[in-house]
Image (tube, rainbow, N blue to C red):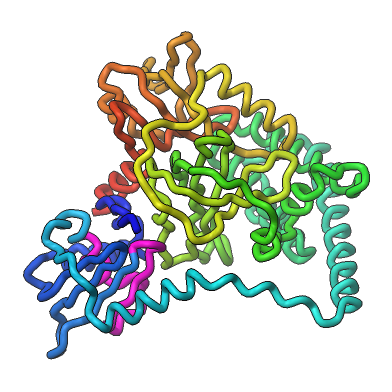
Amino acid sequence: MTTPNYTIEQVHALAPDERALKAGKSQAVSRKWSERGIKEAAVWGLCKGSGKDPYQTQIDLIGPAFRCSCPSRKFPCKHALGLLLLLATEADQFESAAPPHWAEEWISKRRERAQQPETPAKRVADPKAAARRAAQREAKVERGIEDLSVWMRDLIRQGLADAPNLPFGYWDKAAARLVDSQAGGLARMVEELDEIVQVDVNWQEKLLERLAQIHLLICGYRLGEPNAPELWPDLRRLIGWADNKQDLLAQPGVEDRWTVLGQGISEIEVGDRNYGSAMRVQRIWLAGQNSRKLALYIHFAPPGQPLDFSFHVGNSFNGTAVFYPSAFPLRALFREPRGPHGPASHAPGATTILAATASYSNAVARMPWLDRMLLRLGGVGPARHEDTWFLQDEEGHTLPLAKGFAQGWELIALAGGAPMVCCGEWDGHEFEPLSVLSYNRWTDITALTLRDHQRDDE
């Protein structure tokens, strides 16, 4: 079994909040640990606490997963964070030996559960009742869509020029009615209209574009499955229906050696927008070395929960990806177990800016609501004109970087004057770099961004 390696930035991102991270750093001191060990993916240690007995801290690097005998309710606790930080900085100080009985028992049970086949989803005992509930939801969604259509016609009729001055709660009320109609996907799209108007410099163009996407979604859904068979799974998913993961994993998958090309992280509000907290959405992009197929794995981290760093940028593994049904299959789940892991020497499918943006255009033609896609750009270098950063390839084509991207000088340093491979998210307007491959070394740009934000907070 290959032991996953964690960087300091990745450990920082696992902290549930800033206070936990600060406390974890205070535990990353060798003298506080009377015992530290590692065996394959199992890490353990004994940390001196306030009581007479040291805390028993255990980490399974595959996952990762944590367990500690301390009374903390945070996950991971400060002792687990401190132990993992020590592993990232002082790996040679960990004894390579068989784990003690208290750690071996926990790790063994985790390995046994991982080997067990997943229990199939229970079928509904009463098909008639299920059909009745499905019909009731269809009716509620249809009423919500009709209400949204009227709302959009009124908005267009009065004009968009005054959109920034609309009353407080204007967008939220429309979204709340869609939530009541069990059309949560449409509700999120309406909520995003408010963000576009209030934040984006080119809000007029983007607002009209998003309203057109919503209108197209409504028209497509009203056509029905017989008239839009390829788009039907996308239409239902965008409106708010969820896919059953057990049923999905039972479908045929794509076996390949998958390379982790980058990760993007964003936040969405949960609960009341004024008093709720943010849930982090982690988008992990991969490509098959043989199939050249692009895959997107999405992990949701509720408030207080860590991100998923079992996928390391620049690593590759043998695995099976099962894609969600779509007119342009992109999002996927990965069957367990995965591995073995190892470093990747290249980015599968890296190409020119012109070819990469053409692939995005083809994808949007097949699935018009695609908001972003990973581009794999080969032979590019960073450049700057006035206050704008962009990438330029050997053919002379350029791609503007996201306005909020703050690691332009780091890109120049990583390139070192030579062409490099850069992977990032393109939304049709701007490019957000996620990773760089230069001089046979991968750099996780998102991890650098997280590190800089944490330094600013300190």
Res 167 seen here:
no
Q: Is residue 69 magenta?
A: yes
Residue drawn 43% across the image and 11% down it: 394
Res 57 seen here:
yes
User: Farthest residue toward the top?
Assistant: 396
User: Farthest residue toward the left?
Assistant: 31
Span highlighted in magenta in the image? 61-85
* Side of 179 relative to 253 (left or right): right
Which residue is more in the foreground, 45 or 386? 45
Which residue is more in the foreground, 143 or 174? 143
User: At which x and y percent is residue 399?
Assistant: 49, 21
* Side of 445 relative to 165 (left or right): left
- Where's the N terminus, which quadrant? bottom left
User: At which x and y percent is residue 74?
Assistant: 35, 74
- Where's the C terminus, which quadrant? bottom left
Residue drawn 29% across the image and 67% down it: 42
232 shown above or below 124: above
Q: Is residue 261 magenta?
A: no
Residue drawn 85% across the image and 48% down it: 221
Which residue is more in the foreground, 159 or 305? 305
